[in-house]
Image (cartoon, grey):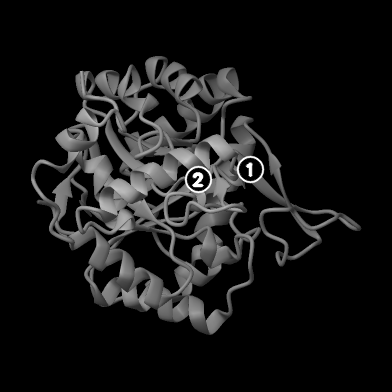
Amino acid sequence: MARYNEKVKLKRSDLHVTRMSLGTAPLGGLFKAVTDEDGDELVNAALELGINYFDTAPQYGHGVAEVRLGRVLQKAKTPFIVETKVGRVLRHVEGVKPEQWFPDAPIDIVPVYDYSREGIKRSFEESLDRLGLDHIDIVLMHDAEDYIPEAINNAFPVLDEYRSQGLIKAIGLGMNYVDPALEIMRNTDLDIALIAGRYTLLDQVAQDNLFPYALAHNIDISMGGVLNSGVLANPVAGATYNYLPASDEIIARAKKISDFLKARGIPPVAAAMQFPLRHPAVTSVLTGPRNAAELKANADDFNFELPTDIWAELEDADLIKRIP
């Protein structure tokens, strides 16, 4: 079985990433504030645990996550791979309400979609500045489902120039939806795709068309949202599913899976963390802990020894889909 800090080479670049990566939306205060001290401790803990793959974005805390991540990585004594995103730029706007996802973000700095060529360049340059680093390894087109032509015709050509010039090593996309992601993949020349919530114990839609395309074209898949934003960890009333309140049907399904796993002595979070790597298209699993203790728990869950036949048992119980 893969271990959380095992490194694997990306198919189309010389980058070697750890099987578990650190996502920094919580570092930017997703739903709840995080202190600078907790943020520093979290990133340092990742480095100490041997995690080398860090994902961030301008949207996360309206720049806060990039600043916090960069502050620690600037002092890192071991090599690391940093991934950020384009498609939104941060602009000063007076009198706006806080964004619902990041209620403690600076209220006069707003992430605004901008898929123009100049917007993509500005986003990249400003991320470099916030991170305080001399490089960004991977750049993803972020949440482009409503900007598919712009992503294909504006964003990708800029990033392709950067890749050709050696300014970045890999181009990808970061999305929650399979169909628009696949459309962009088919019309560009991507190296990697970060897909959130679409290959989990609850939702395997990504394996139908997206994963086969990725395998055929040597596109690595990073899988985020493996807990579907919480319901797989705690399937009770009030749980969230893909960032929204979970329906009774989803909670019931998640509880059925949870009870099935617990009856076999398997922590549901451990199964959820490891599930994406059962598919050969998936290279790395992104986790989003809020502090160092949560990160260490994620690493332990990732390394939990699962029975070799657990996926077959879940398939036979009609709780997950079989891989075609």
| Of the pair 282 and 316, the residue shown nearer to us | 316
| Of the pair 219 and 165, the residue shown nearer to us | 219
> Can you give x and y, in whole percent of width and height, for residue 236 in the image?
53, 53
Name the residue that disc number 2 marks: 85
Say whether marks 2 and 1 touch (CB < 8 Å): yes
| Of the pair 146 and 304, the residue shown nearer to us | 304
| Type of the residue with mark 2 | Lys
Judge left or right: residue 245 versus residue 233.
right
Residue 121: quarter of image: top right
Using a 10 Å C-alpha cutoff, classify the residue at mark 2 as few (fewer than 14 neighbours), some (14 to 19) or many (20 or more): many
* Residue shown at 26% from the left, 47% from the top: 284
Residue 7 position (above or below residue 241) = below
| Of the pair 185 and 197, the residue shown nearer to us | 197
Judge left or right: residue 135 versus residue 94.
left
Name the residue that disc number 1 marks: 88
> Can you give x and y, in whole percent of width and height, for residue 172 in the image?
39, 35
| Label 1 residue SS | strand
Residue 234 is tagged as none
Quadrant of the rendering where the C terminus is positioned: top left
| Type of the residue with mark 1 | Arg
Count of labels in the image: 2
* Residue shown at 32% from the left, 42% from the top: 222
Residue 319: quarter of image: top left
* Residue shown at 67% from the left, 59% from the top: 102
> Can you give x and y, in whole percent of width and height, for residue 164 in the image?
33, 34
* Residue shown at 29% from the left, 28% from the top: 318
Q: Is residue 167 visible?
A: no
